[in-house]
Image (cartoon, coloured by chain):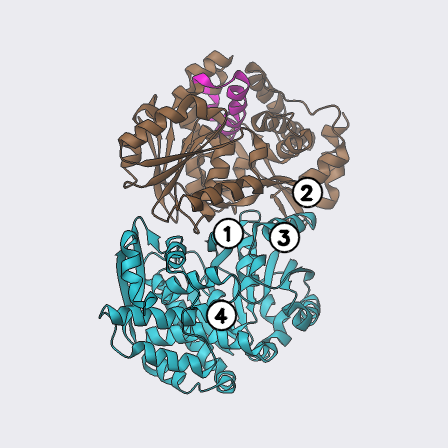
Chain colours: A cyan, B brown
Amino acid sequence: MTVIQVTTATKAYQVQLSDHGLTKIGQAVSAVWTPRQVALITDTNVGPHYAPAVTANLQAAGYRVTVLTIPAGEASKSWAQVERLTAMLSAAQFTRSDGILALGGGVVGDLAGFVAAIYLRGISLIQVPTSLLAQVDSSVGGKTAIDLPTGKNLIGSFYQPDLVLIDPATLTTLPARSLAEGYGEILKCAAIVGGDFWQLAGQITDLSALLAHAAALITASVQFKTQVVMADEKESDQRQLLNLGHTIGHAVELLGQGQWMHGEAVAIGLVQVCRLFEAHQLTAKGTAAQLAMRLHAVGLPTELPAALSPAKLIAAMQHDKKVHGDQLTWVYLQQIGTATFHQVPVANLMTWVAPILTK
Amino acid sequence: MTVIQVTTATKAYQVQLSDHGLTKIGQAVSAVWTPRQVALITDTNVGPHYAPAVTANLQAAGYRVTVLTIPAGEASKSWAQVERLTAMLSAAQFTRSDGILALGGGVVGDLAGFVAAIYLRGISLIQVPTSLLAQVDSSVGGKTAIDLPTGKNLIGSFYQPDLVLIDPATLTTLPARSLAEGYGEILKCAAIVGGDFWQLAGQITDLSALLAHAAALITASVQFKTQVVMADEKESDQRQLLNLGHTIGHAVELLGQGQWMHGEAVAIGLVQVCRLFEAHQLTAKGTAAQLAMRLHAVGLPTELPAALSPAKLIAAMQHDKKVHGDQLTWVYLQQIGTATFHQVPVANLMTWVAPILTK
């Protein structure tokens, strides 16, 4: 088992990476939680694979488990699901001594984490991410969220779990497309960190290589992410580095209306932001091409959809959380291993983004 | 101007008490906020009195102001209003550099505070409480909340404002019943603190005495509350003292379905918890009578409604946030000036509460 210690201003907890860790989940939970009611929040994809065994394992460890299942998919990050889940917790008389265990991908983790953050002003939370994307990204760092019609993750809070339990064995039941999407976020981390991590990414020539190296890639990504989060829990500066590729990525994802998965949109965003900053001579020539080659290896997209209207893309970017006042803060790579910030006035965005829209 | 400094683990800010302070609000806000978009959230009662002047004053200080008005009344502490307000903020392109100013009573403060806590995972907040209840209670301490059908304040978060601005002059436009209700929370503080504060309460023989001593009573209440909040921001122990009278009070308020205002329900809860603990010989004889006399002086109720079903009262208490596992934690007075805790198993509640239900 690999243990990564996370210490923030408000909390200390562990990210545990353990192959087949789900088969001993009761034991892991017992180390941080006294006996209590547990709401196991999962979705219609993940629940059938793992919820019965996880429930039995938790019950054997002395927990009273209620399984709450949400429809799989981004549409569940909604006010309607928050309202439904909190009503169910209240009906089952969950108190501040009880807890929520999120078993699933990023949608489950974001939604269940937000519910844990606001129910009775906060009850305890354990994250058990089962998708590669959630394992390397959304389960670490304490961000919780739901979406608004105007944009993704516009509602949420910072809320740290008591434990993050990552079982790479869950990746074997993941559809190929979901596996690949997780690699979008991994490659983002590798590009920011550079060095050995970037070299390791060079060995991922197809999906089976990705599965074979999953534990090492997840560990490297989580170590990088926790390091950034520890330095800056509330996203005022360093943490924004993690938004590399996300300004264009979020806009593509929003406008695609479900056509692109998050990691796919980030893959597009990563290559496009490098191409854009290469055009502005702020990123080393050839960086976009190197990223594109590694992303293509697992089948990820890297090109802006031809049908995408520039005006809509710009409008979608303006709802981005990275807009402060009248400035949009971009994260970009000077070169592999060196990420930093660049501000562009919102009023100039159309002109500034033109190099990737008009080629 | 009286300034009370609040320093919590996450933030330092001031509670400023200033007679006619609303007429210089732009100046006060400028001391903590750079120029930005401000959502002035108010309600249909308070807005007509103060929103136009406050807006003009803020505009003169360089702020772009959008007034968002909610229907007055507890029913606005709802998912529907949270959804509506966040959608409006997003439509007006509010960013993390913008802010929310809550102008109104407890409903406005609780709701607007919750919206500030979760919109973009938190934007800046200033509380301008205009009711006596909000001035002494809900605006101080960083609690934000909305209600569920199963109980009040079951959803929310801890979120500290950048400034709390209290203008006692706003009390002159408050209906008599609302003024009296605020005194319920003030007397709760006075009973816990004892000494000079309790003596001062002895001088409040009617509503005009309450108005005449409002600044001193608010200051004493806020000083006590901030002291408790600073010692214990997250309500794990000391802060629960503030729940004196609230276990019965919340249940009465919930079951009354709008018949009782919060401070009225607390007044009932204060006297009833003393009577209950006197019966169990844990509170000094005569304490309930002393509280009742002071509450009656401003016209507050102190008796449980005759129609209240004991079974419903017990059931409502079990949804209380003060239930931990299978124990309900009561706050009670050993005597005026000495408050502490007593746990009762939820299973025994009916028998335990019988002395006030069967007399």
Q: Nearer the viewer, residue A287 or B105?
A: A287
Q: In this view, does A91 lie above or below A32?
A: above
The region drawn magenta spans: B172-200
Which callout, 2 or 1, points to the residue nearer the camera?
1
Which callout, 3 or 2, points to the residue nearer the camera?
3
x, y percent for residue A7 = 41, 63
- C-beta proximity under 8 Å, tags 4 and 2: no
| The label number, if any, that marks residue B318 in the structure image | 2
Which callout, 4 or 1, points to the residue nearer the camera?
1
Q: Is residue B215 visible?
A: no
Which callout, 1 or 3, points to the residue nearer the camera?
1
Residue B177 among magenta residues: yes
**Discs 4 and 1 lie in a common subunit:** yes
Q: Which amino acid does label 3 sit on?
A: Leu
Q: Name the residue under label 1.
A: A149
- Identified at 28% across, 63% down, the residue is A341
Left or right, B206 with respect to A243, comes to right
- C-beta proximity under 8 Å, tags 4 and 1: no
